[in-house]
Amino acid sequence: MGVVDTFDSPVCTMHNREVPPPRWEPLSGPAAELVATTAQHLLHDPAELFAATGQAILDALPVVDADADLAASARATSNANITRWLVTMARYPGEPVGTDLTPEALEIARDVIRRGLDREVLWTGYRQGQNTSWLGWMRTLCTMSAGKPEWSGVLGEALDATARSYFGFLDDILVNVEAQVSLERDQLRSDGTSMRLETVRLILDGAPITQERAAKRLGYELAAQHIGFVLWADGEVDQGSLEKTANQLARAAGAGRPLALPVSGSSLWAWSHAPSPLNLRALRDAVTVIERPIHVAIGASAYGMAGFGLTHRQAIDARKLAQRLPEPPRFTSYEDIEVVVLASVDPDRVRHFLQQTLGGLMGERREIRETMLAYLRHERNATSTAKELFTHRNTVLNRLARAESLLPRPSSERPLAVHLALELDHWLAAQPNGE
């Protein structure tokens, strides 16, 4: 029985119970057993509690939800805090939890400050997560208490003790997070990173700052053509590696040293001056020869302070699409996927368009659809398609014949619609774990 299944339990009538001031007293035997059993129950299957809490945090903080790294970090921090408290309740029912921060809590504090965001983002996230996860715990505890008569009689005792423990735990976390935030800001101020991050945030938010003042604060000329990069790795990576990659990309774009800002332990935002149109092949080649497991998404070339923000947002969109694929490509250009981004605004209409355009092909193996897509990208050249897919030309022809037989109408009658539908399927319909 998951936590969401218990949210509407009629057993508990204490939803609005006031949280008493923190103190700790040993629980009675039945109350300790109830708390430990409930904690073990949630630890056995925490997925629904994790999902509900994580989603509540992201719903309350759109700026976090829009940032893939920060959203992942917020979920990881929430899950780690919940797990730590549940483990303590399973072992030592109702007792206080240690005050040291988890690695995840330290990381998100750094990430928020590195992005130039206000510390209120952290406080809002923690409090929203606290409220949602406590609701899940409380209702599960109430439901579990109905399992034994001796448990129902100590429900109030169990709620009081766990409220003191949980809310005290979160209060201690916030005290330590505040100290970490101050430390991180001091470190960023020492090399000017903090001011640059704050300036970037002002530009992205459309705040009233002049182009000249912003350029001075950034140490980067804004009255020029820009290209925005987002670099990330699948795990922790040395920031020097990300910065080196950014420098190589800037050189490939025909520019000098880029503006590079670390925003997490595994990602970096960068901008460089660049000509328009971009030489995408040179940029793609620059990424391909890098052995480190680094991915790059880039925006289109754009001018001035407005273009500085635009190309960055495009790079963010390109990354989001890339990360939908089971194996994100090393290099993703917004220019290559712009039509997909613009056409995917309404998910329901996209699904209808795919079904109407591709028909039975939607239910076929992905390799059949991917072969048809590659064929259309290569302007219906089967030989070039076979080379890209590292397969025999006859295999390509057989797959194409199968694809055509499943389409409601021949692809030659609606070439643009079929190509767009296959692009949308490739970028949007792929699931993280594949088929």
Image (cartoon, rainbow, N blue to C red):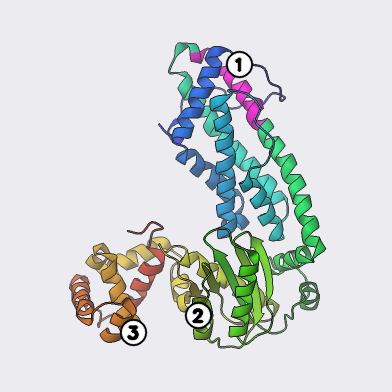
Left or right: 424 in relation to 270: left
Residue 21, compared with residue 423, is above or below; it is above
Question: Marks 2 and 1, Cα distance to the nearest angstrom?
Answer: 62 Å
Question: Marks 3 and 1, Cα distance to the nearest angstrom?
Answer: 71 Å
Mark 3 and mark 1 in contact? Answer it, CB < 8 Å.
no
Determine whether the residue tagged by mark 3 lies in a helix, strand or loop. Answer: loop
Instruction: Please provide percent x and percent y for residue 183.
Output: 78, 52
Disc 2 crowd rating (10 Å Cα; few below 14, some 14-19, many 20+) is some
Quarter of the rendering containing residue 411: bottom left
Magenta-colored stretch includes residue 159 = yes
Magenta-colored stretch includes residue 248 = no
Left or right: 122 in relation to 426: right
Determine whether the residue tagged by mark 2 lies in a helix, strand or loop. Answer: helix
Select label 3 or label 2 by which is in front: 2
**Residue assigned mark 3:** 378
Left or right: 328 in relation to 370: right
From which residue to which does the magenta span run? 151-167
- Identify the mark nearer the N-term, 3 or 1: 1
Q: Which mark is residue 366?
A: none
Outermost residue toward the front in this view:
291
Identify the amino acid type marked 3: His
- Identify the mark nearer the N-term, 2 or 1: 1
Disc 3 crowd rating (10 Å Cα; few below 14, some 14-19, many 20+) is some
**Type of secondary structure dominating the magenta stretch:** helix
Q: Which mark is residue 27?
A: 1
Residue 311, compared with residue 106, is above or below; it is below
The answer to whether residue 59 is visible is: no
Q: Which mark is residue 284?
A: 2
Which residue is located at x 75 percent, y 45 percent? 178
Instruction: Please provide percent x and percent y for residue 325.
Output: 42, 64
Identify the amino acid type marked 1: Leu
Which residue is located at x 44 percent, y 64 percent? 346
